[in-house]
Image (cartoon, rainbow, N blue to C red):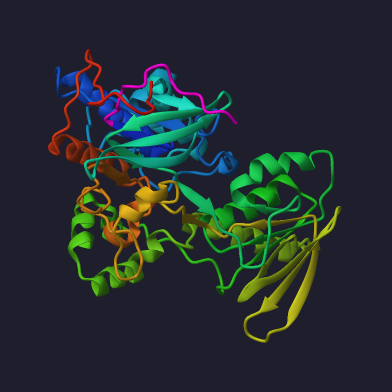
Amino acid sequence: MSQVLPADSTLVHDLIGIGFGPSNVAMAIAIREHNAQAGGQEELDARFFEQQPRFGWHRGMLIDDATMQVSFLKDLVTLRNPASRYSFLCYLQSRGRLIDFINHKNLFPLRVEFHDYFEWAAAKVDDMVSYGHEVVGVAPVVRDGVVDHLEVTVRSGEGLEVHRARNLVVGTGLRPLVPEGVERGDRVWHNSELLSRVDTLEGTSPSRFVVVGAGQSAAENVAYLHRRFPSAEICAVFARYGYSPADDSAFANRIFDPAAVDDYFTAPDGVKQRLMDYHGNTNYSVVDIDLIDDLYRQMYREKVLGTERLRFLNVSRLSDVKETPDRVRATVTSLVTGEESHLDADVVVLATGYGPADPLGLLGEVADRCLRDDEGRVRVERDYRVTTDPALRCGIYLQGGTEHTHGITSSLLSNTAVRVGEILESLLDRGLESASDEVRTVADGTGTGAR
């Protein structure tokens, strides 16, 4: 593929964002609001690149009755700027549903509704993003031994472009995890693709699904498949004895407070681990109690009626999967006895969670200038800026992949609005100079550039 350079080879952006999920949408909004209030040299020039053709956030998990696990007040802006016109409440007003939502007396919107809010907000700053553009590499520009800006190579349908920036904010999201030795296929899905894949079964009569996992998504998948395919058996496989309820009590939820990030960041490593152990049940491998009760009620009802379609294979693990063109065989091993059971199914759904993408995976030799701790993890400062060697003057900010330094909210929506405000403040405090009516140029005018 040939390299296509933008027309303007002199512009250096203050900030380039990699990815345009909720976190970087919130970042774009924060910059837009700042620029609206700033004058002259205080404005920031930012550009975001997203490989998807349009905004999308876990589209495969937008089950029609699934709700958010965070309050609508933890939207993209409210905790940073309660007066923002990009809030969920302003979205509701624009959709003509504000009064209806208030009458609903519920803090937790439907997930599909919150996705629509994200799309609504992203559309208001779409002049700052290039969709269908994948960042494929980052290289330092070195002058006199110092890196004062970076070249970001972006691939689109038109070829390769090279853009320049003084700072990066990486928001590439999470990656689906599958059990070791198991590969996704036509009949082995990760739950992130459930809704797009399940449509391929229209017109067929599936007899059995196997859903692996013990968290919220797994339980939602079980309930959804049970409802959508009334003739199919749904087998839930998990290592626990039963689904564990999420702790969403008021005191436990303080682990998501912005102040908790300060506490976590400054705590000794041993205390960090204890906090994660204490409060992991607020988020990881846990299920809303109402959904647990609904599933148990349905299971019991089926036992009474002699029409059991819900099966729960607890204290067990998926040990093998063999896929054929028309079926898939799942081997489930009891953790107590070691006994194996074979389940022939139409589909195996792996609701086995997500892991952070390598935040430095795209940075190439720039990553070599980023410092790591004794365990090989990226060192990150309180303002979410990666600690680098002194010769790298550019800022690399992370939205995700900072759980080891900033705590449980690293990849969650709870602290998104506050986090982007802190990153913005860091950019400004570190002396950025930008003007909306002035094109800044590289001193010697050499090299490739950006538009």
Query: Residue 248 at what x, y percent from top left?
Result: 36, 57
Q: Quick one: quadrant of the N terminus?
A: top right
Relative to 193, does residue 119 appear above or below in the rendering? above
Q: Residue furthest top?
A: 437
Q: Is residue 2 magenta?
A: yes
- Does residue 196 appear left or right of residue 244 in this picture? right
Q: Residue at x 26, y 55 (%)?
A: 380
Q: Residue at x 39, y 27 (%)?
A: 448
The image quadrant of residue 11 is top left
Q: Residue at x 75, y 60 (%)?
A: 309
- Does residue 213 appear left or right of residue 230 in this picture? left
Query: Residue 249 at what x, y percent from top left?
Result: 33, 58
Q: Which residues are magenta?
A: 1-14
Q: Nearer the viewer, residue 431 or 237?
A: 431
Query: Residue 329 at what x, y percent from top left?
Result: 80, 65
Q: Residue at x 22, y 26 (%)?
A: 443
Q: Quick one: quadrant of the C terminus?
A: top left
Q: Is residue 117 visible?
A: no
Q: Is residue 406 visible?
A: yes
